[in-house]
Amino acid sequence: MRRTVSPFSLITLGLGTFLLVLAPLMAWYVAPRAAVTPIALDTTSVLTGRGSYFDTGQIKTVHDSRITITTRVRGDIEASERSGRAVWDMTSSIDTDRTLPASDPHDALDFSQNRWVTDRTTNKPVHCCKEHPYHEGDVNLKFPFDVRKHSYQWWDGSLGSTVTLHYSGIKKVQGYDGLRFTATVAPTKVGTRLVPGSIVGLPERPEVLAEEWYSNHGIELIADQRTGRMIYAKVAPRMTLRTPGSKQDEMVLLDSQKLDSTTTTQQDSVRQARKESGQLRLVSEVLPVGFGAAGFALAGVGSALAIRGLKRSESSGTSHSAPML
């Protein structure tokens, strides 16, 4: 007697077993390797609002003017691939309507060039690859993947140190849910600047080494929970000058109660967050669950067909070997 099993049942069983093996592989191997900071990027974000600034042409502080912060981030692919890190070059300028569009960014109220280097998985700073300036913290240009509802340390370039961001609930941006984090910065001395004495209330002195003070009325950052991408930002910086040892601001360099992401920047950020979050959800949840369910079903069907085939073979073999009466 020969027992036979149909090829279809064996193929079904094999495919089901393959999917059962593939499901945890997608969740535990593929998904973590997909959640890495991108290196091929070129993005521009714009924050705008109204405030005060020191006009060097008029030699005075101008109030209730539109102020714009433009930040462009480009990935250095060659340096990133060579180091295995995310190497991002950033330029940032603070402008008024008079300096926008800026043919020379150095005409802006403030212009800076930075290089940020982070671990592509943890988002932690990595001090290599001509990083500038040195920075620390959990959050720089983005949050870590899988953002948690707790406090984070955000690197404030104006302060030259980290600021504690406190979790403040869920907030929609362009109809998309994000995790909201807030902070303030108390007035802090951040440096000195040689200026004419007249602009800090000391007209009898031709030059004064004035103290630069920085504070922030309110920082608000909203991040996509899965990817850590920022989908909204608001800052309210205040930069002033004081005479040495004084506790009173003598001149305002920059002051605004609200500079926040433009509608276009919000829409672009949300569109990217939806796309990237969907891709991560696909490889970390949808495919593993789908493969697991399909594998379980196919393996069950294949096993059932194989067992049925064996039983039929046994039944057939028994009937053929029965003695003739």
Image (cartoon, helix red, strand yellow):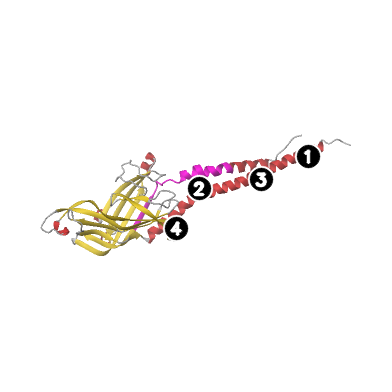
Q: Is residue 40 magenta?
A: yes
- Please state which amino acid type lies under the numbered disc 3: Val
Q: Image point 76% across, 38% down: which residue? A: 314
* Residue 243 drawn at (x, y percent): 17, 55
Q: Residue furthest bottom?
A: 64
The residues tagged by marks 3 and 2 sit, at their Cα atoms, a distance apart of 26 Å
Q: Residue furthest right?
A: 325
Q: Which element is circle 3 on? A: helix
Instruction: First in sequence, mark 4 or 2: give its number.
Output: 4
Q: Is residue 301 visible to the viewer in this orientation of the structure?
A: yes
Instruction: First in sequence, mark 3 or 1: give its number.
Output: 3
* CB contact under 8 Å: marks 3 and 2: no
Residue of label 3:
301
Q: Is residue 254 magenta?
A: no
**Which quarter of the picture shows residue 195?**
bottom left
Question: In this rendering, which labeled residue sits more in front, label 4 or label 1?
Answer: 4
Q: Quadrant of the C terminus?
A: top right
On residue 284, which mark appears? Answer: 2
* Residue 183 drawn at (x, y percent): 34, 55
Residue of label 1:
316
Residue of label 4:
177
The crowd level at tag 2 (other Cα within 10 Å; few <14, some 14-19, many 20+) is many
**Which quarter of the picture shows residue 231?**
bottom left
* Residue 257 drawn at (x, y percent): 30, 61
- Please state which amino acid type lies under the numbered disc 1: Ser
Q: Which residues are magenta?
A: 19-46
Question: In this rendering, which labeled residue sits more in front, label 3 or label 4?
Answer: 4
Residue 243 or residue 126, whichever sits in front: 243
The crowd level at tag 3 (other Cα within 10 Å; few <14, some 14-19, many 20+) is some
- Please state which amino acid type lies under the numbered disc 4: Asp
Residue 141 or residue 200, whichever sits in front: 200
